[in-house]
Amino acid sequence: MSTRRLVLTRSAAAIGAASTGLFLPEIARAQSNKIRVGLMLPYTGTFAQLGVAIENGFRMAINEQGGKLGGREIEYFKVDDESNPAKGVENAQRLVQRDKVDVLVGTVHSGVQMGIHRVARESGVLNIIPNAGVHVATRAQCAPNVFRTSFTNSQPTLGLGKAMVERGHKKAVWITWGYAAGEEAMEGFEQSYTAAGGQIVKKLALPFPNVEFQALLTEIASIKPDAVACFFAGGGAAKFIRDYAAAGLNKTIPLYGSGFLTEGVLDAAGPAAEGIITAMHYSDSLDTATNRRFRLEYAKTFKSQPDVYAVQGYDSGLLLVQGANAVKGDLNNKQALYAAMQNAKIDSPRGKWTMSKSNNPIQDIYLRKVEGKENKVIGIAAKAVQDSGAGCKMG
Ligand code: PHB
């Protein structure tokens, strides 16, 4: 190539760049005018309904703001994470690198959360966890850009042990899926149960998301404990409740659980769920103006009854709204955004709650009993429960 042609080519390229340059800022501005919200949730599998309820609740909070965040329009990007931990990193990266989301809302499953967590810590993207309770996300690996609006896995079960011992159940079998959520729910149960004088006589587990409970139910029948306590959720929880009753165990060995057991499954579980006592940071029957209004609006909009997942989705929206309003929609103003979210006071259908120093809710745990198609509050199991946040070095 001659020198002259090279010069010409160069200048042509320069002109090209200059002319696109005229348009680029405008395009960039038009794009960045919308806040990009990524929803990474399960829309298939045993937790599918949980994902839908979270998205409904989240959109409800945003729609109460005219569909905007800090005055800016929103564009949604969705990924079905299938509750598959093996694809957790890849799915989170899709949202962060390809879709360039400003905030990633997700997810439900603790194993998948660890994938999101890695991407959130490496990229610095804002992550709001609307369910998954994996301890480490707000303990040793806490991060200033990661906020949880739900619970740590041991928070609900910290409210369970005393209630069971008070009802005369001193020896219990624990049963769950063998992954972080089940194991950490057990930690809370063991702590509260042994402190109250109870003893776990056997710990049983099956792999997530298996629902072949028969062999384990036979084992429970032969052990004859005073009671059974468990962590199951979603479709698997409905099946566990039905199988437990079909085996006749509900007549002789009362079933207790982390409250997810009876959330969103009461239609599917039917009469088999009647009388089950659980501990949870929400109850359908909380008699507050905020809860009554929330339940009415949700039922009207989505033609279904809200559950704890819908509440957590809603609170994720409320938290983001408070943050975005504080920075007038400029989510790049991270210091002010995170300060506003860290200091947020959430007027939730579950009751008012605030963030702990490690960005996890400080909240009451209610004792509930299934009556008809409702989780009825029968007491407060534990007030203002705060996760230990052990090892969190955020200040
Ligand atoms: C979790 O994997 O952290 C998890 C899943 C479903 C629940 C609660 C916790 O209902």
Image (cartoon, rainbow, N blue to C red):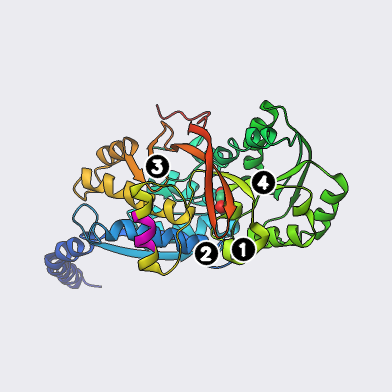
| Residue 84 visible in the current orientation | yes
Instruction: Identify the mark nearer the N-term, 4 or 2.
Output: 2
Residue 102, how many percent across, how many down? 32, 54
Q: CA distance from mark 1 to mark 4?
A: 17 Å
**In this rendering, would 102 be left or right of 146?**
left
Q: Which residue is mark 2?
A: 49
Label 3 sits on what residue type?
Gly
Of residues 254 and 82, which is closer to you in this image?
Answer: 254
Disc 3 packing (10 Å; few <14; some 14–19; many ≥20):
some
Task: Name the residue located 62 percent from the left edge and 46 percent from the top edge.
Answer: 277
Return the mark for residue 256.
4
Label 1 sits on what residue type?
Gly
Report helix, strand or loop for mark 4.
Answer: strand
Label 1 C-beta lies within 8 Å of the nearest ligand 1 atom: no
Report helix, strand or loop for mark 3.
Answer: strand
Disc 1 packing (10 Å; few <14; some 14–19; many ≥20):
many
Q: Are marks 1 and 2 in contact (CB under 8 Å)?
A: yes
